Image (cartoon, rainbow, N blue to C red):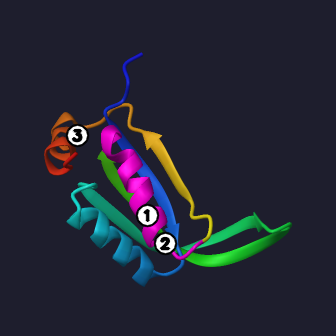
Amino acid sequence: MQTPEYSVILVTASSLEEAKKIAAILLDKRKAACVNIVPQVHSSFWWQGKIDKAEESLLVIKTTASATQAVIDLVKANHSYTVPEIIALPIAGGNPDYLDWIKREVQP
């Protein structure tokens, strides 16, 4: 199986403002070609031994596999959560023109 060249990274943020701040940092540093923000998601999760709930914003970050660790590092450095959700998924395929665009826009 071929190693994927691209990743989509999911990150939840405490607010729309925090999501916009993180998106701007990733784009300014050319570690993401595109960041979609879903402004309101209802999250339920285990935290410190009990079920908790939060209203969050979801970032959907498109980048290269080689920039994934830089995205993780930047998110962790600029996120308000002690343990932010950062989940990187390999992109197995897609529109070749779009994937080529990601490669052109993300800088190592």
Q: Position of residue 63 (x, y in %)?
A: 30, 48
Residue where numbered disc 2 is placed = 79
Mark 1 in CB contact with mark 2 (< 8 angstroms): yes
Callout 1: few (<14), some (14-19), or many (20+) C-alpha neighbours within 10 Å? many
Q: Position of residue 77 (x, y in %)?
A: 45, 67
Q: Residue furthest top?
A: 1
Callout 2: few (<14), some (14-19), or many (20+) C-alpha neighbours within 10 Å? some
Q: Residue at x 76, y 74 (%)?
A: 52
Q: Residue at x 86, y 66 (%)?
A: 49
How far is the residue under mark 3 from the one under mark 1? 22 Å
Q: Residue at x 30, y 69 (%)?
A: 25
Amino acid marked by disc 3: Leu
**Where is residue 36, by image quadrant?**
bottom left
Residue where numbered disc 1 is placed = 75
Using the image, determine if residue 100 lies above or below residue 70.
Answer: above
Quarter the C terminus occupies = top left
Residue where numbered disc 3 is placed = 99
Amino acid marked by disc 1: Val
Position of residue 56 in the picture relative to residue 43 (left or right): left
Position of residue 1 in the picture relative to residue 5 (left or right): right
Residue in the foreground of this view, choosing between 80 and 95: 80
Position of residue 101 in the picture relative to residue 60 (left or right): left
Name the mark on residue 48. Answer: none
Q: Which residues are magenta?
A: 64-81
Mark 3 in CB contact with mark 1 (< 8 angstroms): no
